[in-house]
Image (cartoon, grey):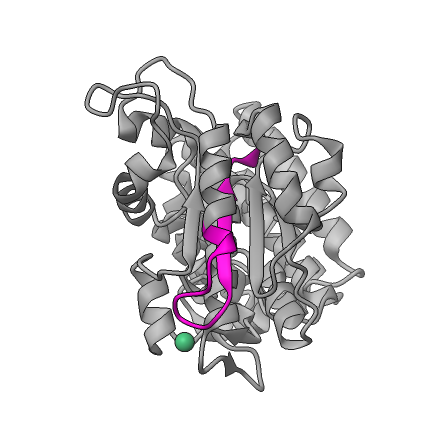
Amino acid sequence: MQFKDIKGQTLTANHLTEIIDSGRVSHAQLFLGDTASGSLALAIAYAQYLNCEHRQHYDAAGPDGLRADSCGECPSCKKYQQLTHSDLHLFFPNAATATVKGNNISVADFQSEFREFLNAKHQTGTLDEWYEFMQIENKQGLIRERDADEMVRTLGMKSYEGGYKVAIIWMAEKMNAQTANKILKCLEEPTPGTLIILVAESSDKMLSTIISRTQLVKVRNICNEVRNASDEFRTLYVTWMRQLFKLNMASLSAWVDTLHSKSREVQKQFLLFAQESVRDAFLRNNAGLPSQIDFGDEKFNNSFPAMITEHNIEALNDAFNNAIFAIERNAYGKIAFMELSFRISKALKKR
Ligand SMILES: [Zn+2]
Protein backbone atom coordinates (compact mmCIF):
# COMPACT_ATOMS: atom_id res chain seq x y z
CA MET A 1 0.00 0.00 0.00
CA GLN A 2 1.33 3.39 -0.97
CA PHE A 3 0.12 6.55 0.75
CA LYS A 4 -1.11 7.91 -2.57
CA ASP A 5 -3.74 5.15 -2.67
CA ILE A 6 -5.28 6.12 0.66
CA LYS A 7 -7.98 8.75 0.24
CA GLY A 8 -8.27 11.75 2.51
CA GLN A 9 -5.34 11.04 4.85
CA THR A 10 -2.65 13.31 3.43
CA LEU A 11 -1.96 15.11 6.72
CA THR A 12 -1.40 11.86 8.62
CA ALA A 13 0.66 10.41 5.77
CA ASN A 14 2.94 13.48 5.73
CA HIS A 15 3.30 13.22 9.50
CA LEU A 16 4.24 9.53 9.24
CA THR A 17 6.83 9.88 6.49
CA GLU A 18 8.35 12.78 8.41
CA ILE A 19 8.75 10.56 11.49
CA ILE A 20 10.59 7.94 9.45
CA ASP A 21 12.75 10.43 7.55
CA SER A 22 13.84 12.05 10.78
CA GLY A 23 14.81 8.65 12.22
CA ARG A 24 12.45 8.96 15.18
CA VAL A 25 10.64 5.66 14.63
CA SER A 26 9.27 4.41 17.91
CA HIS A 27 9.28 0.61 18.13
CA ALA A 28 5.67 0.52 19.32
CA GLN A 29 2.89 2.61 17.88
CA LEU A 30 -0.86 2.80 18.22
CA PHE A 31 -2.83 3.86 15.13
CA LEU A 32 -6.19 4.93 16.50
CA GLY A 33 -9.12 5.47 14.13
CA ASP A 34 -11.70 3.72 11.94
CA THR A 35 -10.41 1.03 9.63
CA ALA A 36 -12.86 2.33 7.02
CA SER A 37 -11.08 5.69 7.21
CA GLY A 38 -7.76 4.00 6.49
CA SER A 39 -6.07 3.29 9.85
CA LEU A 40 -4.89 -0.19 8.82
CA ALA A 41 -3.99 0.93 5.29
CA LEU A 42 -1.87 3.73 6.81
CA ALA A 43 -0.09 1.26 9.11
CA ILE A 44 0.77 -0.96 6.14
CA ALA A 45 1.84 2.02 3.99
CA TYR A 46 3.99 3.18 6.91
CA ALA A 47 5.75 -0.19 7.18
CA GLN A 48 6.21 -0.26 3.40
CA TYR A 49 7.75 3.23 3.43
CA LEU A 50 10.01 2.25 6.32
CA ASN A 51 11.40 -0.68 4.32
CA CYS A 52 11.40 0.98 0.88
CA GLU A 53 14.79 1.13 -0.82
CA HIS A 54 14.00 4.20 -2.91
CA ARG A 55 11.73 6.49 -0.92
CA GLN A 56 10.25 9.24 -3.06
CA HIS A 57 10.31 12.86 -1.92
CA TYR A 58 8.37 15.56 -3.69
CA ASP A 59 9.75 19.09 -3.71
CA ALA A 60 6.38 20.60 -4.39
CA ALA A 61 3.41 18.65 -3.09
CA GLY A 62 3.06 15.26 -4.80
CA PRO A 63 -0.16 13.34 -5.49
CA ASP A 64 -2.95 14.74 -3.28
CA GLY A 65 -0.49 16.96 -1.40
CA LEU A 66 1.84 14.16 -0.28
CA ARG A 67 5.41 15.14 0.53
CA ALA A 68 6.84 11.62 0.33
CA ASP A 69 5.84 8.05 -0.48
CA SER A 70 7.36 4.62 -0.98
CA CYS A 71 8.50 3.86 -4.55
CA GLY A 72 6.18 0.90 -5.16
CA GLU A 73 8.85 -0.62 -7.41
CA CYS A 74 11.74 -1.91 -5.30
CA PRO A 75 11.74 -5.62 -4.28
CA SER A 76 10.60 -4.75 -0.75
CA CYS A 77 7.73 -2.54 -2.01
CA LYS A 78 6.62 -5.18 -4.48
CA LYS A 79 6.32 -7.75 -1.70
CA TYR A 80 4.52 -5.24 0.51
CA GLN A 81 2.09 -4.43 -2.29
CA GLN A 82 1.26 -8.15 -2.48
CA LEU A 83 1.31 -8.44 1.32
CA THR A 84 3.82 -11.27 0.90
CA HIS A 85 6.88 -9.66 2.52
CA SER A 86 8.47 -12.24 4.86
CA ASP A 87 9.06 -9.64 7.57
CA LEU A 88 5.48 -8.41 7.64
CA HIS A 89 3.44 -10.29 10.22
CA LEU A 90 -0.28 -9.70 10.52
CA PHE A 91 -2.36 -10.44 13.62
CA PHE A 92 -6.13 -10.05 13.77
CA PRO A 93 -9.25 -11.36 15.52
CA ASN A 94 -10.13 -14.91 14.56
CA ALA A 95 -12.52 -17.69 15.51
CA ALA A 96 -13.43 -21.19 14.44
CA THR A 97 -15.36 -21.45 11.19
CA ALA A 98 -17.21 -24.23 9.39
CA THR A 99 -13.96 -25.28 7.69
CA VAL A 100 -11.33 -24.35 10.29
CA LYS A 101 -12.29 -26.06 13.55
CA GLY A 102 -10.69 -27.27 16.77
CA ASN A 103 -9.40 -25.83 20.02
CA ASN A 104 -6.10 -24.66 18.68
CA ILE A 105 -7.05 -22.28 15.91
CA SER A 106 -4.99 -19.13 15.64
CA VAL A 107 -4.09 -16.37 13.16
CA ALA A 108 -1.80 -18.88 11.46
CA ASP A 109 -4.89 -20.65 10.10
CA PHE A 110 -6.27 -17.55 8.38
CA GLN A 111 -3.26 -15.80 6.86
CA SER A 112 -4.24 -16.28 3.24
CA GLU A 113 -7.93 -15.49 3.88
CA PHE A 114 -6.96 -12.32 5.68
CA ARG A 115 -4.76 -11.16 2.80
CA GLU A 116 -7.54 -11.96 0.35
CA PHE A 117 -9.90 -9.88 2.48
CA LEU A 118 -7.45 -6.95 2.61
CA ASN A 119 -7.00 -7.02 -1.14
CA ALA A 120 -10.73 -7.24 -1.80
CA LYS A 121 -11.49 -4.27 0.45
CA HIS A 122 -8.42 -2.13 -0.32
CA GLN A 123 -7.33 -2.61 3.30
CA THR A 124 -10.30 -0.61 4.56
CA GLY A 125 -12.72 -3.46 5.32
CA THR A 126 -14.36 -3.30 8.75
CA LEU A 127 -14.37 -5.92 11.50
CA ASP A 128 -17.95 -6.94 10.66
CA GLU A 129 -16.95 -7.35 7.03
CA TRP A 130 -14.02 -9.53 8.08
CA TYR A 131 -16.30 -11.75 10.19
CA GLU A 132 -18.63 -12.05 7.25
CA PHE A 133 -15.72 -12.81 4.92
CA MET A 134 -14.38 -15.61 7.13
CA GLN A 135 -17.94 -16.79 7.80
CA ILE A 136 -17.76 -17.10 11.55
CA GLU A 137 -21.50 -16.45 11.72
CA ASN A 138 -22.54 -15.22 15.16
CA LYS A 139 -19.32 -15.93 17.00
CA GLN A 140 -16.99 -13.19 18.16
CA GLY A 141 -13.39 -13.12 17.06
CA LEU A 142 -10.55 -12.72 19.53
CA ILE A 143 -6.81 -12.30 19.48
CA ARG A 144 -5.72 -15.07 21.82
CA GLU A 145 -2.67 -16.08 23.81
CA ARG A 146 -1.68 -18.48 21.04
CA ASP A 147 -1.55 -15.52 18.67
CA ALA A 148 0.63 -13.59 21.11
CA ASP A 149 2.95 -16.62 21.44
CA GLU A 150 3.24 -16.67 17.66
CA MET A 151 4.13 -12.99 17.67
CA VAL A 152 6.77 -13.37 20.39
CA ARG A 153 8.28 -16.27 18.45
CA THR A 154 8.32 -14.42 15.08
CA LEU A 155 9.72 -11.20 16.45
CA GLY A 156 12.42 -13.17 18.26
CA MET A 157 13.78 -14.50 14.97
CA LYS A 158 16.19 -12.75 12.64
CA SER A 159 14.78 -10.57 9.92
CA TYR A 160 14.47 -12.56 6.67
CA GLU A 161 15.21 -9.72 4.33
CA GLY A 162 17.50 -7.59 6.44
CA GLY A 163 15.08 -4.71 7.01
CA TYR A 164 12.63 -4.03 9.79
CA LYS A 165 10.50 -6.84 11.15
CA VAL A 166 6.98 -5.50 11.40
CA ALA A 167 4.08 -6.90 13.39
CA ILE A 168 0.70 -5.28 12.82
CA ILE A 169 -2.07 -6.13 15.25
CA TRP A 170 -5.36 -5.14 13.70
CA MET A 171 -8.26 -4.45 16.06
CA ALA A 172 -5.92 -4.62 19.03
CA GLU A 173 -8.91 -4.02 21.32
CA LYS A 174 -9.83 -7.67 20.61
CA MET A 175 -6.83 -8.95 22.60
CA ASN A 176 -7.93 -10.58 25.82
CA ALA A 177 -6.06 -9.80 29.05
CA GLN A 178 -3.66 -12.75 28.74
CA THR A 179 -2.77 -11.81 25.17
CA ALA A 180 -2.23 -8.18 26.13
CA ASN A 181 0.10 -9.17 28.97
CA LYS A 182 2.22 -11.27 26.65
CA ILE A 183 2.38 -8.48 24.08
CA LEU A 184 3.37 -6.11 26.86
CA LYS A 185 6.64 -8.00 27.20
CA CYS A 186 7.46 -7.32 23.53
CA LEU A 187 6.67 -3.66 24.03
CA GLU A 188 8.84 -3.42 27.13
CA GLU A 189 11.85 -5.30 25.82
CA PRO A 190 11.87 -4.75 22.09
CA THR A 191 14.34 -6.63 19.93
CA PRO A 192 16.31 -4.26 17.70
CA GLY A 193 14.94 -3.66 14.20
CA THR A 194 11.41 -4.45 15.29
CA LEU A 195 8.29 -2.39 14.82
CA ILE A 196 4.97 -3.25 16.43
CA ILE A 197 1.92 -1.35 15.24
CA LEU A 198 -1.34 -1.74 17.10
CA VAL A 199 -4.31 -0.64 15.02
CA ALA A 200 -7.46 0.04 17.02
CA GLU A 201 -10.76 1.82 16.59
CA SER A 202 -11.12 2.54 20.29
CA SER A 203 -8.64 2.49 23.15
CA ASP A 204 -11.36 2.24 25.84
CA LYS A 205 -10.97 -1.50 26.35
CA MET A 206 -7.19 -1.62 26.05
CA LEU A 207 -4.88 -1.95 29.02
CA SER A 208 -3.46 1.41 30.05
CA THR A 209 -0.05 -0.25 30.40
CA ILE A 210 -0.19 -1.08 26.68
CA ILE A 211 -1.33 2.39 25.65
CA SER A 212 1.34 4.10 27.72
CA ARG A 213 4.06 2.12 25.96
CA THR A 214 3.03 3.11 22.45
CA GLN A 215 3.39 6.27 20.45
CA LEU A 216 -0.07 7.45 19.45
CA VAL A 217 -0.97 8.19 15.84
CA LYS A 218 -4.51 9.57 15.60
CA VAL A 219 -6.19 8.76 12.33
CA ARG A 220 -8.86 11.23 11.31
CA ASN A 221 -12.26 9.76 10.58
CA ILE A 222 -13.46 10.78 7.15
CA CYS A 223 -17.18 11.42 7.01
CA ASN A 224 -19.27 9.30 4.69
CA GLU A 225 -20.26 12.17 2.42
CA VAL A 226 -16.65 12.80 1.60
CA ARG A 227 -15.66 9.15 1.41
CA ASN A 228 -18.55 8.17 -0.83
CA ALA A 229 -18.75 11.37 -2.81
CA SER A 230 -19.77 10.26 -6.23
CA ASP A 231 -18.02 11.53 -9.32
CA GLU A 232 -21.18 13.42 -10.10
CA PHE A 233 -21.04 15.38 -6.83
CA ARG A 234 -17.43 16.27 -7.46
CA THR A 235 -18.09 17.46 -11.00
CA LEU A 236 -21.17 19.42 -9.91
CA TYR A 237 -19.17 21.08 -7.17
CA VAL A 238 -16.17 22.04 -9.32
CA THR A 239 -18.40 23.47 -12.07
CA TRP A 240 -20.42 25.41 -9.52
CA MET A 241 -17.46 26.94 -7.70
CA ARG A 242 -15.89 28.05 -10.98
CA GLN A 243 -19.16 29.68 -12.08
CA LEU A 244 -19.50 31.45 -8.75
CA PHE A 245 -16.02 32.83 -8.97
CA LYS A 246 -16.80 34.41 -12.34
CA LEU A 247 -20.55 34.74 -11.69
CA ASN A 248 -21.67 33.71 -15.12
CA MET A 249 -25.48 34.00 -14.83
CA ALA A 250 -26.48 31.95 -17.88
CA SER A 251 -24.44 28.90 -16.95
CA LEU A 252 -25.28 29.31 -13.26
CA SER A 253 -28.96 29.20 -14.08
CA ALA A 254 -28.46 25.96 -16.05
CA TRP A 255 -26.50 24.53 -13.13
CA VAL A 256 -29.30 25.37 -10.70
CA ASP A 257 -31.76 23.60 -13.00
CA THR A 258 -29.58 20.48 -12.94
CA LEU A 259 -29.51 20.35 -9.15
CA HIS A 260 -33.20 21.21 -8.93
CA SER A 261 -34.05 18.19 -11.11
CA LYS A 262 -32.73 15.81 -8.45
CA SER A 263 -34.61 14.39 -5.49
CA ARG A 264 -34.65 16.39 -2.27
CA GLU A 265 -32.50 13.84 -0.50
CA VAL A 266 -29.83 14.04 -3.20
CA GLN A 267 -30.01 17.85 -3.12
CA LYS A 268 -29.44 17.79 0.61
CA GLN A 269 -26.59 15.27 0.37
CA PHE A 270 -24.94 17.41 -2.26
CA LEU A 271 -25.16 20.53 -0.08
CA LEU A 272 -23.66 18.60 2.85
CA PHE A 273 -20.88 17.39 0.58
CA ALA A 274 -20.23 20.93 -0.67
CA GLN A 275 -20.21 22.31 2.88
CA GLU A 276 -17.72 19.64 3.98
CA SER A 277 -15.57 20.36 0.93
CA VAL A 278 -15.46 24.06 1.80
CA ARG A 279 -14.57 23.24 5.39
CA ASP A 280 -11.84 20.88 4.17
CA ALA A 281 -10.49 23.62 1.87
CA PHE A 282 -10.34 26.03 4.81
CA LEU A 283 -8.37 23.57 6.93
CA ARG A 284 -5.99 22.79 4.05
CA ASN A 285 -5.48 26.46 3.32
CA ASN A 286 -4.62 27.21 6.94
CA ALA A 287 -2.15 24.33 6.94
CA GLY A 288 -0.76 25.51 3.59
CA LEU A 289 -1.70 22.26 1.85
CA PRO A 290 -3.70 21.48 -1.28
CA SER A 291 -7.16 19.97 -0.89
CA GLN A 292 -7.54 16.61 0.76
CA ILE A 293 -10.54 15.73 -1.37
CA ASP A 294 -9.68 14.64 -4.87
CA PHE A 295 -12.02 16.43 -7.25
CA GLY A 296 -10.55 14.71 -10.28
CA ASP A 297 -9.22 18.09 -11.43
CA GLU A 298 -5.66 18.81 -10.42
CA LYS A 299 -5.81 22.54 -11.00
CA PHE A 300 -8.90 22.83 -8.83
CA ASN A 301 -7.44 20.55 -6.11
CA ASN A 302 -4.41 22.78 -5.83
CA SER A 303 -5.91 26.23 -6.23
CA PHE A 304 -9.30 26.09 -4.52
CA PRO A 305 -8.18 25.92 -0.85
CA ALA A 306 -6.62 29.38 -1.14
CA MET A 307 -10.11 30.81 -1.80
CA ILE A 308 -11.37 29.91 1.67
CA THR A 309 -9.98 32.00 4.50
CA GLU A 310 -10.86 33.24 7.97
CA HIS A 311 -12.56 36.22 6.23
CA ASN A 312 -15.24 34.17 4.50
CA ILE A 313 -15.51 30.74 6.14
CA GLU A 314 -18.19 31.85 8.59
CA ALA A 315 -20.35 33.49 5.92
CA LEU A 316 -20.01 30.37 3.75
CA ASN A 317 -20.94 28.06 6.58
CA ASP A 318 -24.03 30.15 7.45
CA ALA A 319 -25.09 30.22 3.82
CA PHE A 320 -24.90 26.43 3.58
CA ASN A 321 -26.74 25.93 6.86
CA ASN A 322 -29.57 28.19 5.68
CA ALA A 323 -29.87 26.40 2.35
CA ILE A 324 -29.84 22.95 3.97
CA PHE A 325 -32.47 24.12 6.44
CA ALA A 326 -34.59 25.46 3.58
CA ILE A 327 -34.37 22.20 1.61
CA GLU A 328 -35.30 20.19 4.69
CA ARG A 329 -38.35 22.44 5.09
CA ASN A 330 -39.39 21.86 1.45
CA ALA A 331 -38.57 25.37 0.26
CA TYR A 332 -38.54 25.88 -3.50
CA GLY A 333 -35.19 24.47 -4.58
CA LYS A 334 -34.41 26.87 -7.42
CA ILE A 335 -34.73 29.93 -5.19
CA ALA A 336 -32.76 28.33 -2.35
CA PHE A 337 -29.89 27.33 -4.68
CA MET A 338 -29.80 30.70 -6.40
CA GLU A 339 -29.73 32.55 -3.09
CA LEU A 340 -27.01 30.25 -1.80
CA SER A 341 -25.02 30.81 -5.00
CA PHE A 342 -25.12 34.59 -4.60
CA ARG A 343 -24.05 34.37 -0.97
CA ILE A 344 -21.13 32.08 -1.84
CA SER A 345 -20.08 34.27 -4.75
CA LYS A 346 -20.07 37.34 -2.48
CA ALA A 347 -18.13 35.50 0.22
CA LEU A 348 -15.49 34.22 -2.23
CA LYS A 349 -14.67 37.83 -3.12
CA LYS A 350 -13.94 38.62 0.55
CA ARG A 351 -11.05 36.26 0.96
ZN1 LIG B 1 10.27 0.88 -2.60
Q: Residue at x 56, y 39 (%)?
A: 336
The reply to whether the magenta stretch includes residue 321 is no
The reply to whether the magenta stretch includes residue 164 is yes
Q: Position of residue 342 (x, y in %)?
A: 62, 53
Q: Residue at x 44, y 80 (%)?
A: 53
How many numbered discs?
0
Quadrant location of the C terminus in the rendered image = bottom right
Q: In this rendering, is residue 140 above or below 90? A: above
Q: Is residue 15 left or right of residue 175?
A: right
The magenta stretch spans which residues?
154-172
Q: Is residue 297 left or right of residue 285?
A: left
Residue 263: quadrant of the picture: top left
Residue 81: quadrant of the picture: bottom left
Q: In this rendering, is residue 111 above or below 265? A: below
Residue closer to the observer: 60 or 165: 165
Which residue appears farthest toward the right when viewing the image?
Answer: 311
Residue closer to the observer: 159 or 278: 159
Which residue appears farthest toward the top when viewing the image?
Answer: 138
Q: Residue at x 47, y 47 (%)?
A: 153
Quadrant location of the N terminus in the rendered image = bottom left
Which residue appears farthest toward the bottom when viewing the image?
Answer: 59
Q: Residue at x 70, y 48 (%)?
A: 188
Residue closer to the observer: 26 or 187: 187
Whether residue 87 is visible here, answered yes or no, is yes
Q: In this rendering, is residue 173 above or below 58? A: above
Q: In this rendering, is residue 266 above or below 292? A: above
Residue closer to the observer: 236 or 114: 114
Which residue appears farthest toward the left when viewing the image?
Answer: 99
Q: Position of residue 128 (x, y in %)?
A: 40, 26
Q: Position of residue 222 (x, y in %)?
A: 55, 45
Q: Position of residue 77 (x, y in %)?
A: 37, 70
Which quarter is ligand 1 in?
bottom left
